[in-house]
Image (spheres, helix red, strand yellow):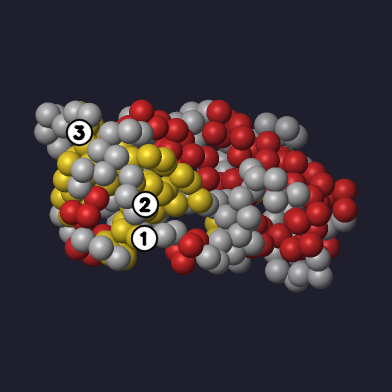
Amino acid sequence: MPELPEIETIRTSLAINIGASITSIDVKRDDIMRREDFPPDELYGQPITEIRRRGKYLAFLLGNGLYLVVHLGMSGRFYMQPEAEEISAPHVHFIVYLDNGRKLLYQDARRFGGIWLCRDTERLFALMGVEPLSGKFTTGYLAKIAENRKVAIKTLLLNQQLISGIGNIYADESLFAAGIRGDRPAGSLTAAEIKRLHRAIVKVLKKSIQERGTTFRDFRDGFNRSGNFQNSLQVYGKDKQACTVCGGIIKKEKIGGRSSHFCERCQK
Ligand SMILES: [Zn+2]
């Protein structure tokens, strides 16, 4: 699933379309529309003034103050293509035509994601937790949400109502970087461990953004190109392989129902 670094990579790669106006929208499948506060043609002639990211959501702000919001679910892609170029990709469910000679395509074989046309994003984003790369995500905040909690620390990191944008890949990678096992009760982490984990989360997310995200299977940026952070992964998807730090074997087990990768020697 695309997580914070992947959505951020799509956001920055699509920024060249800021200022371009929407000429038309083609909804190929109605079930991809999650909310329509207004019909799509209310966006016609409106320029894209800003592209924002909140957690794993991408929000296009239009000149008339309306929003087109995209969530890529498990396997979605959102990328641009020259308008004249024929669409050869399968499962393209939603197309935004722009007046700059490009079109934006939403492609998703599994359709866990969707499109929201909304007058504001407050309701949609109301329950979302802090952005891990914002000033609100501090060591103190992480300590506060972990305090006295019996839930596994990994499950806590995946809770989008507490921290938004971290999914399975970056939870596993951050816990490895911090040397902490994901199945530890959140409340059992010491102050030093919380500090290490906080630093690891920020570092791993920033490094992945620099590397333009992780392409494990599906992720593509706004140019329909793969990311590079898969080359920097230490544990995610590495089960039965040797740990690059200690040479031990990376294990894969379920934590809170999610496949989790870790090194028993490096993570305590
Ligand atoms: Zn190790």
Q: Could you tell me if residue 261 is visible in this image?
A: no
Q: Is mark 3 within 8 Å of ligand 1?
A: no
Marking on residue 119: 1
- Kind of residue sitting beneath label 2: Gly
Name the residue tied to disc 2.
Answer: 65
Q: CA distance from mark 2 to mark 1?
A: 7 Å
Q: Which mark is residue 232?
A: none
Is 99 or 3 nearer to us in this picture? Answer: 99
Q: Earlier in the sequence, mark 3 or mark 1?
A: 3
Q: Position of residue 25 (x, y in %)?
A: 18, 48
Compared with 73, 174 (above or below) is: above
Please give the count of numbered marks on the rendered protein. 3
Q: Residue at x 54, y 33 (%)?
A: 209
Q: Are marks 2 and 1 in contact (CB under 8 Å)?
A: yes
Circle 3 is placed at which residue position?
Answer: 99
Residue in the picture at 22% in, 55% down: 42
Splitting the image into 4 quarters, where does residue 189 fall?
bottom right
Q: Which residue ends up furthest to the front in the rendered image?
A: 64
| Cα distance in 3D space between marks 2 and 3 | 19 Å
Q: Secondary structure at mark 1?
A: loop
Identify which amino acid the numbered label 3 is placed on: Asp
Task: State the SS at label 3.
Answer: loop
Q: Is mark 2 within 8 Å of ligand 1?
A: no
Side of 110 relative to 196 (left or right)? left
Does residue 210 sit above or below 250 in this rendering?
above
Tell me the kind of residue under disc 1: Arg
Q: Give SS at disc 2.
A: loop
Q: Nearer the viewer, residue 51 or 167?
A: 51
